[in-house]
Image (tube, rainbow, N blue to C red):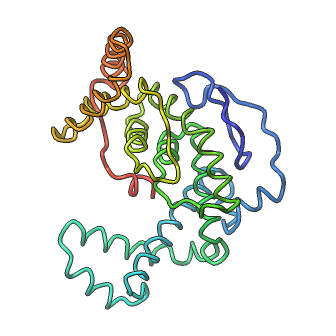
Amino acid sequence: MRVKTIAMGWVLVGLSGAGNFAAATTSIKEPARDTTAELLQGIPPAEQASSASAYRYVRHCLARRQFESFLGSDGIDPDATSSLRVRAAGMPEPLRARFLENVRMLAARRAACAPWQQSVAPDKAALQVYLLALDNAAAGDARAAACFVALPWAEPMQGTPDHARFAGAYTAQARILIDAGIARGSWLMVRAAAGRLNAHPHATMTLPLEPALAYRISRLMQMGIEDPALSRTFAADARSYASSLSPAVLEVLEKDVQSQFSSVFAGRGGDMESFTRLCD
């Protein structure tokens, strides 16, 4: 199945074959000039050379904007060094180290992000980062694919054209990326899909998955997580999904999941760092 070309028109490729993000190229129709300009809004020309550089730039500037907004909502002037130091002094580790890391990031990215931050509204920024993540996922970036599925960034406001475009892209592409990522042994994708399975029932974007796939994801998480308590939680989830499957289907599925974990995932899980950090 091919990924719909919705974004920038640089290197979008098809997902033909469950195990390969970049198995086949597809004909790219030049996007409308205003669409391209809209998605490149605020991104300096030097960062427009590739989808990867544009995605990295927007991710970094979005992280900066979000931390600046967090400080403002807490009544802290992001430019007041003394206030930031006082706030950090009362924090326990490792929260203090992370806070100071973000403070340094504010200063380091100030100049580079200024044109983007001044010209791109929050809803448009949200649309930008998700469509750029999808673009990079289609080009073979497994982390970008997991970030797209995990929804680590704010979404455009509901009821807006930007949200409609975002929701359309997510609904059309998330399942394709999940299937491809799990088939190729992407632990990040297993985690991203598991996170969506356990999303709040009132979340704006839900990801309905059939019981067999939900069982596979939960069992892979159960086997790949070292924390016993978390592993038991995913075991309970797997049992819940198994109740919707016939004994014959479950027997075949369980053998396949165990084989996949041993071979494709080499019998182990992987990074458990938060998607907030992984997708910065």
Quadrant of the rendered structure where residue 225 is?
Answer: top left
Residue farthest to the top, as pictured: 248
- Please tell me whether residue 10 is drawn above or below residue 187 in the rendered image: below
The image shows residue 22 at horizontal and vertical percentages of 60, 30
86 to the left or right of 139: left
Quarter of the image where the N terminus is located: top right
Q: Residue at x 64, y 57 (%)?
A: 163
The image shows residue 216 at horizontal and vertical percentages of 37, 26
The image shows residue 268 at horizontal and vertical percentages of 27, 29
Q: Nearer the viewer, residue 257 or 181?
A: 257
Quarter of the image where the C terminus is located: bottom left
Q: Nearer the viewer, residue 143 or 47?
A: 143
Q: Residue at x 60, y 42 (%)?
A: 171
22 to the left or right of 182: right
Q: How many marks?
A: 0
- Please tell me whether residue 30 is drawn above or below residue 216 in the rendered image: below
Q: Residue at x 84, y 56 (%)?
A: 33
Quadrant of the rendered structure where residue 279 is?
Answer: bottom left
137 to the left or right of 14: left
Q: Residue at x 37, y 82 (%)?
A: 74
The image shows residue 18 at horizontal and vertical percentages of 54, 23
